[in-house]
Image (cartoon, rainbow, N blue to C red):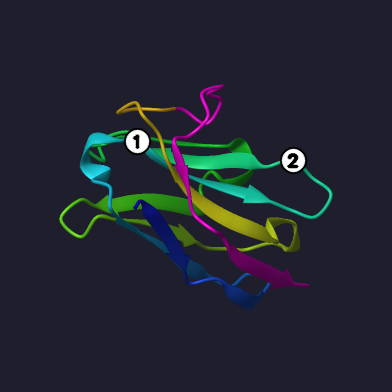
Amino acid sequence: QVQLVESGGGLVQAGGSLRLSCAASGLSFRTRAVGWLRQAPGKERELVATISRSGGSTDYVDSVKGRFTISRDNGKNTVYLQMSSLKPEDTAVYYCAAFRNGIVVVTTLTPPDYWGQGTQVTVSS
């Protein structure tokens, strides 16, 4: 059974930082691109960062460029999202997702194969 489990969310003040983790079981991340998506109340789910299967290529939505960093440790089957200079508009449930392809950009129309349950990130002003 495939499981993606996110952790690291929480409440933080604007300007603060959080590091999200996504650990996979029943699935090898090393063959797949992985992304982080978020969904704020009343808004559509948005793919904000992706990383290729090797980790050599990353992509970000403009609103998080320079503030978020996606990384991966294939040996630990884990992907991370380091979030800095957080803003209230970053408040959302954050999900990790694994894609069939080895490289994916944030504008992809291809849905992921697997999702996690999400972790709440709340940024107070």
Q: Secondary structure at mark 1?
A: loop
Relative to 33, is 48 on the left or the right? right
Contact (CB < 8 A) between labels 2 and 1? no
* Label 2 packing within 10 angstroms: few (<14), some (14-19), many (20+): few
- The three-letter amino acid code for the residue at tag 2 is Glu
Q: Main secondary structure of the magenta part?
A: loop
Quadrant of the snapshot with the C terminus: bottom right
* Label 1 packing within 10 angstroms: few (<14), some (14-19), many (20+): many
Image quadrant assignment for residue 34: top left
Vertical order, 5 against 34 (above or below):
below
Which residue is drawn at the image coordinates 44% and 35% (left, top)?
113
- The three-letter amino acid code for the residue at tag 1 is Ala
Q: CA distance from mark 2 to mark 1?
A: 21 Å
User: Which label sits on residue 74?
Assistant: none
- Residue 16, position in %: x, y? 58, 73
Q: Which residue in the rendered view is the most extreme toward the left? A: 75
Relative to 26, is 75 on the left or the right? left
Which residue is drawn at the image coordinates 62% and 50% (left, top)?
38
- Residue 14, position in %: x, y? 68, 71
Q: Is residue 119 magenta?
A: yes
Vertical order, 75 against 108 (above or below):
below
User: Which label sits on residue 33?
Assistant: 1
Q: Which residue is mark 2?
A: 44
Q: Secondary structure at mark 2?
A: loop
Image quadrant assignment for residue 78: bottom left
Q: Which residues are magenta?
A: 105-125
- Residue 92, position in %: x, y? 68, 58
